Image (cartoon, coloured by chain):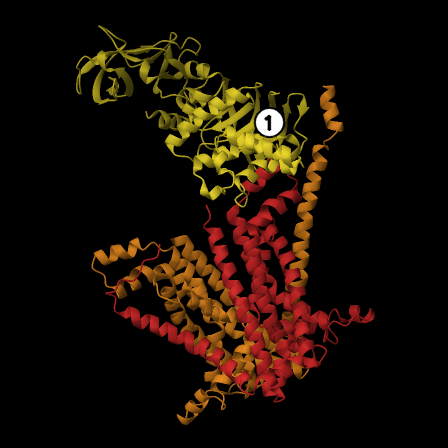
């Protein structure tokens, strides 16, 4: 258990203060700054911006991409986690390493990869062009890069839980007559639900905030392939500063809400781990 | 109601390692059969194969007149109790117990009645809505037992069920399992490394070692008539004396130990004598020994003795037989009921036996 | 005998088909995992690396030939090092404070530390603009002092420190939590002061977590674009980082050159990851 620092340790106050200053200057003050800056021109600017069709479209697009990414990475994430923990096969450590690859790449590299694969003259371009399916500079590529970037989150949260829980409960379930599917839904899934939820929350935050890769693959088509973050980028570049700040503030507000959810889930997950 | 289990030629290989070799025995209907052996003897593997949690490499399993070998775990309808309980941590005690019934789509009222019945049986009725983490180890194992019994299995398999519990709790649960079994009469197969537990609970004991069966018999047979050196050394304490077979006796220095008539003349042999079979002789005995240490255990004492040839013996002697002799004294002792076997072949086997008997 | 045969033909399937179904299911799951990771993760990486070296080392050399390219890589490397170093220290301190101290607002602090995990990096950039820009009190204050933050490497370092703030903390925190304070108490009874105790008892125990967190931070900084692109000014050879440079190259339809620089960054990260995992493995083996 953690000990409380004794009063005679005089450095304690300084330590705490320096940490608070670090966090304050880097995070809290800028956060306050953006609230003030966004609201300074007046509330009517805020409502006007949020009603603009461009902005609404951008928010919708971000929502669509996020939902698809979350669903895909959650589903396949559980499958991959299961295969990694419960199966033994040649290439398992390779698969394990592959899961972590997205963390080693810059988002621009991911966008670039999509360009190489689907862009003009790309490897897979002929296949899709022939069928009239637009991948690059359209929604599909934006979804794909976001999924790539979000792959590790659910897997890395679920794997340790699956490992720790072990096979006993699942074995017991089978001896009691439950089929493989029944065992999964009644025994395994409840055991990983908080870890999975936490991974989903992280994925959501990451997907909403994606900028580097979509900068490259979206083609920056205003009103068509512009996500919320891309809108902020363009608005700033075009000197529509107030609009940029308003949408930025909106995303910040969403993130803070998400943060509260994430903290709650993390707390829940911690409690799960210490159960029994 | 209850059926016997017959296991024939069961073998299990993991890669190149053979964990279980050609195991054949019958667990009689309505009785408790213990699979007894040290860790690594393959006993848990045998149990898991009977449950269907492991696939045998060879052999068959028959329950009553049903061929189990081809059936899936779910179809076998065996009750299984795990060493670490394996309770579903996200379900209440009641939901845990009712799981097997829920899964077989039993009617809700019937299910709830049965759950209540079983919780009463294990004396855990007030805990029905608690979660496993709120229960003690002993309580959890009782829930696990109730859960296994709920679907009325014909066979109950227990894998070191008390291994994770404190000594006192273990004793209590052992007694309680005995009573439960008398009441229910389900064919039970109990895996344990605790020979006291096996001797106390089982109607039949299957002693296993390194994947093979050493002996099958009643507790009395196993204890009094061990068939192999391993059984003699593993079940009950034993002193081991190594010597040579001459004229039906094991010769060790000036000591002549009878009971080796079945062994070849001249062969190296090991004689096993239980500590309580070492008696203080009135007058001349089999051999003279020097007392090294006397530890009083209440009404009897554990006496460490040294023989003329340097071998050590441990004897359990009632205090009134000791008559005031103490450390350093020489006494005459008789060695009763010796069991002689051919000395274990390999050095590791010898070391194995010595380690377990403390000689 | 006959009832056994009945049982065989009746409800249960033969053993072999039982096994086959289970095996098929196993393989199907594994196949799904392989296809998912193979198409969505492995393929893109292979694409970039191949493009970067597609025409041999020539492409790579050409891409890196411009002084802007090397300057960008250098800038990225040193700003990432500074940010990683700062966060190594502050992150460890934060972890210590969060685990060992009790004070009002501790839970809040812990939550705020995680903010960069939730907030879009671009928004972080906008926040920095708001704070240090000419329109804010703080910005004007610094201007008066003659300190320029925006569009200088300082802004880059600030951005990097902000977005990677939680990484070292979250790596070190669980390890600190698990530590048995008995060792520190023993050191105290033997006369060691708090700093000595930290140096000799605590730090060795958390060292690998700190290193892993720092390398993770560094790796993340190498590829950071969202927070940097608005605040750096992107002046070639001055404040143009490698990721922004890659973006510019793709906008100029020079994917091969972009891929070359991207592969270089990836190679550095990759080596780091290898080193980290070996370090962690070695550390775990020796304890």
User: Observer-nearest residue: B263 or C251?
Assistant: C251
Q: Position of residue C203 (x, y in %)?
A: 34, 62
Q: Which chain is orange?
A: C
Q: How many marks?
A: 1
Q: Position of residue B279 (x, y in %)?
A: 28, 12
A65 horizontally vs A274: left or right: right
Furthest-top residue in this view: B283
- Local crowd at mark 1 within 10 Å, few (<14), some, or many (≥20)? many
A81 horizontally vs B198: left or right: right
Position of residue B111 relative to residue C287, above or below, is: above
C112 horizontally vs A188: left or right: left
Element class at badge 1: strand
Query: Which quadrant, please, contains the N terminus of chain C?
Result: top right
Q: Position of residue B203 (x, y in %)?
A: 49, 18
Residue B278, quarter of the rendered image: top left
Position of residue B110 relative to residue C194, above or below, is: above
Q: Which residue is mark 1?
A: B10
Residue drawn at x 54%, y 40% as measured from the top left: A168
Does residue C243 show up? Answer: no
Chain letter of mark 1 equals B
Does residue B190 show up? Answer: yes
Q: Position of residue A107 (x, y in %)?
A: 60, 72
Position of residue A95 relative to residue B210, above or below, is: below
User: Observer-nearest residue: B120 or B177?
Assistant: B120
Q: Which chain is yellow?
A: B
Residue A228, quarter of the rendered image: bottom right
Residue drawn at x 50%, y 55% as measured from the top left: A269
In the rendered structure, the colour chosen for chain A is red
């Amino acid at each position: 258990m953690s000990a409380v620092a004794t009063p005679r340790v005089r450095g304690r106050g300084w330590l705490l203060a320096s940490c608070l200053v670090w966090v304050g200057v880097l995070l809290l003050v800028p956060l306050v700054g953006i609230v003030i800056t966004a609201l300074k021109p007046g509330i009517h600017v805020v409502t006007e911006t949020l009603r603009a069709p461009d902005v609404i479209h951008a928010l919708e697009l971000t929502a669509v991409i996020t939902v698809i990414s979350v669903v895909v990475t959650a589903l396949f994430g559980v499958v991959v986690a299961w295969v990694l923990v419960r199966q033994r096969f040649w290439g398992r450590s390779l698969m394990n390493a592959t899961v972590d690859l997205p963390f080693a790449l810059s988002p621009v590299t991911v966008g670039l990869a999509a360009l190489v694969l689907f862009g003009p003259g790309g490897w897979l371009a002929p296949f899709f062009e022939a069928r009239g399916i637009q991948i690059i500079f359209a929604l599909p590529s934006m979804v794909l890069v976001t999924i790539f970037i979000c792959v590790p989150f659910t897997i890395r949260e679920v794997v340790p839980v699956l490992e720790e829980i072990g096979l006993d409960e699942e074995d017991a379930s089978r001896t009691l007559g439950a089929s493989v599917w029944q065992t999964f839904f009644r025994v395994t899934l409840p055991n990983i639900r908080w870890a999975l939820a936490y991974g989903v929350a992280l994925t959501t935050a990451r997907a909403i905030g994606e900028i580097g890769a979509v900068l490259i693959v979206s083609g920056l088509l205003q009103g068509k392939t512009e996500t919320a973050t891309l809108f902020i980028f363009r608005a700033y570049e075009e000197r529509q500063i107030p609009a940029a700040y308003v949408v930025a503030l909106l995303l910040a507000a969403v993130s803070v809400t998400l943060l509260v959810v994430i903290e709650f889930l993390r707390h829940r997950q911690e409690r799960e781990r210490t159960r029994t | 109601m209850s059926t016997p289990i017959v296991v024939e030629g069961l073998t299990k290989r993991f890669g190149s390692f053979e964990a279980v070799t050609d195991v054949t025995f019958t667990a009689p209907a309505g009785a408790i059969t213990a699979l007894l052996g040290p860790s690594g003897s393959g006993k848990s593997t045998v149990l898991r194969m009977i449950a269907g949690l492991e696939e045998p490499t060879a052999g068959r399993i028959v329950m009553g007149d049903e061929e189990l070998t081809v059936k899936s775990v779910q179809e076998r309808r065996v009750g299984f109790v795990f060493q670490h309980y394996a309770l579903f941590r996200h379900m209440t005690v009641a939901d845990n117990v009712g799981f097997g019934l829920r899964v077989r789509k039993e009617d809700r009222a019937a299910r709830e009645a049965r759950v209540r019945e079983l919780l009463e049986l294990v004396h855990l009725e007030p805990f029905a809505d608690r979660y496993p983490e709120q229960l003690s180890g002993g309580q959890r194992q009782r829930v696990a037992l109730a859960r296994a019994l709920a679907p009325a299995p014909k066979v109950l398999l227990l894998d070191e069920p008390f291994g994770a519990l404190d000594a006192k709790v273990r004793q209590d649960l052992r007694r309680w399992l005995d009573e439960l079994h008398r009441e229910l009469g389900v064919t039970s197969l109990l895996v344990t490394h605790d020979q006291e537990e096996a001797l106390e609970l089982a109607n039949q004991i299957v002693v296993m070692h390194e994947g093979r069966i050493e002996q099958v018999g009643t507790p009395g047979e196993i204890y009094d008539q061990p068939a192999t050196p391993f059984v003699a050394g593993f079940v009950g304490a034993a002193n081991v004396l190594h010597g040579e077979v001459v004229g039906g006796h094991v010769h060790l220095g000036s000591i002549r130990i009878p009971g080796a008539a079945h062994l070849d003349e001249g062969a190296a042999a090991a004689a096993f004598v239980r500590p309580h079979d070492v008696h203080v002789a009135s007058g001349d005995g089999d051999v003279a020994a020097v007392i090294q240490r006397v530890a009083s255990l209440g009404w009897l004492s554990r006496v460490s003795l040294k023989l003329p040839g340097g071998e050590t013996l441990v004897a359990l002697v009632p205090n009134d037989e000791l008559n005031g002799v103490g450390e350093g004294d020489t006494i005459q002792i008789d060695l009763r009921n010796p069991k002689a076997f051919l000395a274990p072949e390999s050095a590791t086997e010898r070391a194995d036996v010595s380690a377990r008997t403390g000689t | 005998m006959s009832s056994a045969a009945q049982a065989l033909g009746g409800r249960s399937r033969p053993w072999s088909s039982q096994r086959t179904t289970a095996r098929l299911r196993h393989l199907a799951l594994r196949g799904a995992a392989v296809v998912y990771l193979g198409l969505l993760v492995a393929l893109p990486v292979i694409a970039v690396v191949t493009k970067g070296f597609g025409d041999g080392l020539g492409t790579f050399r050409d891409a890196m030939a411009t002084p802007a390219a090397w300057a960008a890589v250098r800038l990225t490397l040193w700003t990432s090092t500074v940010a990683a170093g700062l966060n190594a220290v502050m992150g460890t301190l934060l972890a210590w404070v969060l685990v060992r101290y009790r004070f009002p607002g501790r839970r809040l602090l812990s939550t705020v530390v995680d903010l960069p995990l939730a907030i879009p990096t671009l928004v972080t950039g906008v926040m920095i603009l708001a704070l240090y820009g000419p329109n804010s009190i703080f910005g004007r204050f610094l201007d008066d002092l003659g300190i320029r933050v925006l569009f200088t490497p300082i802004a880059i370092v600030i951005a990097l420190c902000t977005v990677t703030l939680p990484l070292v903390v979250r790596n070190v925190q669980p390890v600190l939590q698990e530590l048995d304070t008995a060792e520190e108490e023993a050191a105290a009874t033997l006369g060691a002061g708090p700093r000595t105790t930290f140096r000799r008892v605590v730090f060795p125990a958390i060292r690998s977590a700190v290193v892993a967190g720092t390398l993770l931070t560094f790796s993340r900084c190498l590829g950071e674009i969202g927070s940097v692109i608005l605040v750096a000014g992107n002046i070639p050879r001055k404040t143009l980082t490698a990721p922004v440079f890659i973006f510019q190259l793709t906008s100029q339809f020079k994917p091969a050159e972009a891929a070359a620089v991207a592969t270089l960054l990836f190679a550095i990260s990759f080596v780091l990851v290898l080193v980290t995992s070996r370090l962690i493995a070695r550390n775990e083996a020796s304890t």
